[in-house]
Amino acid sequence: MPLLLDQVKQSILVANGLQPQEIDQVMDTLLSAPLDAADIYFQSSHFESWSLEGGIVKEGSHSIEHGAGVRVVSGDKTGFAYSDRIELPILLEAANNVKAIVRQGQQARHKIETPKSWTRLYQPFNPLKSLDDQEKIDLLKRVDAETRKLDSRIEEVMVSLVAAYDNVLVANQDGSLAADIRPLVRLNVSVIMVENGRREQGSMGGGARSDYSYFLENDRALEYGREAVRQAQVNLQAEDAPAGNMTVVLGPGWPGILLHEAIGHGLEGDFNRKGTSAFSGRIGERVASDLCTVVDDGTLPGRRGSLSIDDEGTPTENTVLIENGILRGYMQDKLNARLMGVKPTGNGRRESYAHLPMPRMTNTYMLPGISDPEEIIRSVKKGLYARNFGGGQVDITSGKFVFSTSEAYLIEDGKITRPVKGATLIGNGPDVLTKVSMVGNDMQLDSGVGTCGKDGQSVPVGVGQPTLKIDGLTVGGTNV
Amino acid sequence: MQNQAEINRLKDVVQQLLDEAKHQGASAAEAAFSVDNGLSVSARLGEVETVEYHCDQGIGVTVYFGQKKGSASTNDVSPDSLKETIKAACSIARYASEDEYAGLPDPERLATEFPDLDLNHPWNIDAEQGIALAIECENAGRAYDKAISNSEGASVNSHQGTRVFGNSLGFLQGYQSSRHSLSCSVLAGNGGGMHRDYWYSVARNAANMESAQLVGQKAAQRAVARLGARSLSTRQCPVLFAPEMASGLIGALLGAISGGSLYRKASFLLDALDTQIMPDFVRIHEQPLLKGALGSASYDAEGVATQARDIVNDGILRSYVLSTYSARKLGLQTTGNAGGVHNLTVETGENDFAAMLKQLGTGLLVTELMGQGINRVTGDYSRGASGFWVENGAIQYPVQEITIAGNLKTMLRNIVAIGNDVDLRGNIRVGSILLEQMAIAGE
Ligand SMILES: [Zn+2]
């Protein structure tokens, strides 16, 4: 751990001409006001993307960004300023600006640095350097060539490859310094297929907090291509989707965005402190059938949504949100945890140094149940089997949420029959899980593609679930 | 009002980038440098909640080695970093494939006239004044009705920035612009029947924004109107998109006629140029030179002159929306839309909102849409919705937890009327839109 801390001090502070002990000067300026908390978030990020279409790698881009964000908190009031120049005079000026918000508060104590410990969930390597540029191009071209071979109806293949290498350092008012090096890679394949003038699309991707070798293991990259083609093939056969309220069976894995939208956002600490969530004040109440246990777990090694420490320096946790149907807890950052009198859960996240942290999800999933997935399908007389989804959205106050299928089938007399076109599903967060009547034994996490947006800030997240049967969800097809 | 000294400072950096690209062997290059400063304050329950000082800058470069292209960006504008950034872009270009369509715009397409579009109105507001205004706005919302039960607060944002763009064909231009906004979000009702809604106002000039009072009141009015919302039974019926929602519908059309979707053949409007795609009363045109408007620009993201032109008239698709690259891929000329459209305007009919409701008769008024359920390749459309059930032109009750579905190809052809209640807060300027019929799914 000290090695990692030194490495990050070097890459962010020293490289920009700030001596590590100068952090104390900035902190002293902040702490001359009576406040509850203060932190400085230093960040240096490298990012690259490559994309292939029409059989050629026509575009690539590279970016380097760094900066520092200075925050003070007093009661429920926050002052914040940031700069892309990590230099003492600039940070001192930012500190003087933001502390003006403080009018009352506890005098935060400037304690001596106490080393915290946590488990490192990913290797601190730079994924941009894990392949040389020619190898990246070769990978994209190989995915393109192999994918095109799969079906003569393929008209276009698009492949994109991105990697981020993020160094962060959080200085807290108690004198602690927490550092993290976060790799993140993603590869995506989408295809367009044409048959008899009908045109359909399929896409698949994946990623991890790892390097590019992740896509070479088990031929993952080629597997994404096969899956994209399979989805487009299914969609070429799809008929109009049904409209109305019906039994819906959700497949395992990525359909777990149900949990992210229907309950996850509503259980973030800020909304609950303010009483604006449909779940506010409902700890201890039943919000799901007793088959449902849902956690937010930032501690899964290498997962896209995982973090060794959150963006406030708190080690991430496996937080139980719903246990056997009973609401157990919220996800917290430091500010909301303090104001609600609970412990932070390692969910304080921010898009970058230029954004304020807030409670955000990491990897949100439901634990497996006991039902055989085939038995779940067999139990449905008439309904919808939704195997894959696009994105979703929620209104955390009314609890209404949506998510849209990208691969779905009719279930007729206990059998999956015909594929149907994409449709939006809509439900009510606080009661959708009370309608879960069967939970499969096939829990899966998604392939590592999730990005969550809140207040204009995007962060990588994960989801997962076993096959689920929901007795009644509104399916927004055209077949009335 | 333009601060020429600041524009020149950025121009010098952009020129250095272009020179450095040439020095490193690039046959052509383009570069942009933008600086943005701002203040955001929010207040909740009558007290300040956050004060944020924004200060962003960034440079981006694209270099060409013949027909090979590479891009890089950074927020570090030190001389060393500029060199490194060019180096990164050049390195990518060396590895990228030859692309016969890649390259800078044809020189004769570059803008040569740069009228003052009245885009820059800095607002001398400090944190204290911003807080006072946010509190006034939120108070107006909270006091509006006894049913207002909670608040997510009100916020005031003020941003001012400078943007310079240049390329190795000798184009080097810059301008300053400002953008200010005021927003409020409040809750009505309690427990399971709790609803939230918001309102905002945005303008280049703070004096043109709606008053804090009005923004707060509209937010409250919208939240209260949702109380008692229920689902509908599954049915087919006419649907009226409120102006804020209608702009999304036009946005979906725009996506389908954009060069990137067309040359990838990922559009439900392939080969639709010069064909009827909407009823014959529809005219959609671009107005890039409107003074003080949010989407105004005399040149696009690659320096090409923007054009005031018809995209749809008499319901016929007259023009795609193209950049230099997508135009070359399609064998056409750029339309000055690299980076997007500029004040896309849908001509309105005679009807105000009340008349539109009357014309709807019995059906659904949609005031909110959720999710991304639009398939640009097939035009299939299915989204979560809330709004109001209307009978004989009068609002009956709020509805929620329903979906509306159709196919954009038919939806666009089935537009019955377009209102004159235009929402001017975005880059797409359109009033409410009435569609003959859509599929509604509910309880
Ligand atoms: Zn989310």
Image (tube, coloured by chain):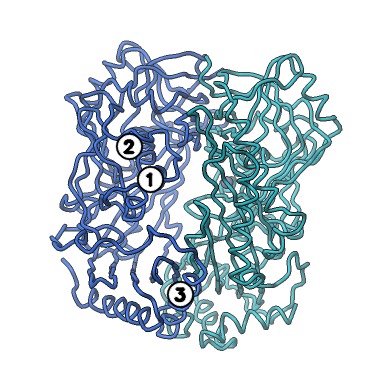
Chain colours: A cyan, B blue
Circles 1, 2 touching at the beta carbon (< 8 Å): yes
Question: Could you say where residue B319 lies in the image, as x and y percent from the top left?
Answer: 26, 40
Query: Which residue shows up at 63% across the image and 31% down it?
Result: A234
Residue bearing the label numbered 2: B218
What x and y, as percent, mark residue A20? 59, 86
Q: Rate crowding at label 1 as few (under 14), some (14 to 19) or many (20 or more) other CA atoms within 10 Å.
A: many
| Badge 2 amino acid | Lys
Circle 2 sits in a helix, a strand or a loop, which is it?
A: helix
Mark 2 or mark 3: name the one nearer the start of the chain. Answer: 3
Q: Earlier in the sequence, mark 1 or mark 2?
A: 1
For residue A19, which quarter of the picture? bottom right
Q: Which subunit holds the residue at mark 1?
A: B
Q: Residue A241, located in which quarter of the rendered image?
A: top right
Q: Which residue is mark 3?
A: B90
Viewer-side residue, B173 vs B440: B173
Rendered-image quadrant of the N terminus of chain B: bottom left
Point 40% across, 65% down: residue:
B67
